[in-house]
Amino acid sequence: MLVDKTTFYESVETNLVMCENGTFISDAIADDQGLIVKTPKGLVVISGCAHRGIINMLLHAQNITEEKRIHLVLGGTHLFKASEERIHKTIAALKELKVQKIGVSHCTGSSVSALLAREFPDGFFANNAGTCIEIAS
């Protein structure tokens, strides 16, 4: 999905590149991988890696679906190399968006996962290979 850059604190790493006409250039990764499912409880947003920023992805999902409730965020958040400022702004935005459940994986990083577990004690879970999730209506 093409994800708009809405937040000022989320940015794509400059070391991510693509080859264009035989030359490596910076890749803005406008076409981040993700899936949005509209459910009776709100949106379920599944992120591949959220290179453009997990909050940018969530805002984009809300915008194109016209659904403001976010039931579940699942997948990578690409916060493992993020600055303290970005991590704290992301957590604050997740709270402001009233995310009900969050299951993070791979590129989130263990320290950020621990922070999310502390900040979302009733909604956080580790999302590992083999995790089964039921989204009931």
Image: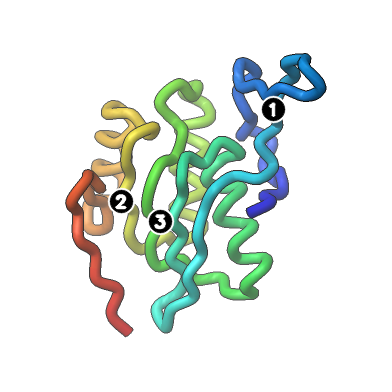
The image quadrant of residue 73 is: bottom left
Tell me the residue at 77%/16% (across/down): 22
If you read the primary sequence from the N terminus, does the residue marked by circle 2 or circle 3 appear first?
3
**Badges 2 and 3: C-beta atoms under 8 Å apart?**
yes
**Badges 3 and 1: C-beta atoms under 8 Å apart?**
no
Query: Three-letter amino acid code at disc 1?
Result: Asp
Q: For this view, does 75 lie left or right of residue 127?
A: right
Label 3: how many residues lie within 10 Å, few (<14), some (14-19) or many (20+)?
many
What mark, if any, has residue 38 been given in the picture?
Answer: none
Tell me the residue at 57%/74% (across/down): 67
If you read the primary sequence from the N terminus, does the residue marked by circle 3 or circle 1 appear first?
1
Could you tell me which secondary element the residue under label 2 belongs to? Answer: strand
Q: Please, is residue 29 above or below residue 54 in the view? A: above
Q: Nearer the viewer, mark 3 or mark 1?
A: 1
Colour scheme of the picture: rainbow
Q: For this view, does 37 lie left or right of residue 124?
A: right
What mark, if any, has residue 73 been given in the picture?
Answer: 3
Circle 1 sits on which residue? 27
Distance (Cα) linking label 3 and label 1: 25 Å
Q: Position of residue 117 (x, y in %)?
A: 25, 43
Distance (Cα) linking label 2 and label 3: 6 Å
Query: Three-letter amino acid code at disc 3?
Result: Val
Distance (Cα) linking label 1 and label 2: 27 Å
Q: Position of residue 105 (x, y in %)?
A: 32, 41
Tell me the residue at 46%/66% (across/down): 70
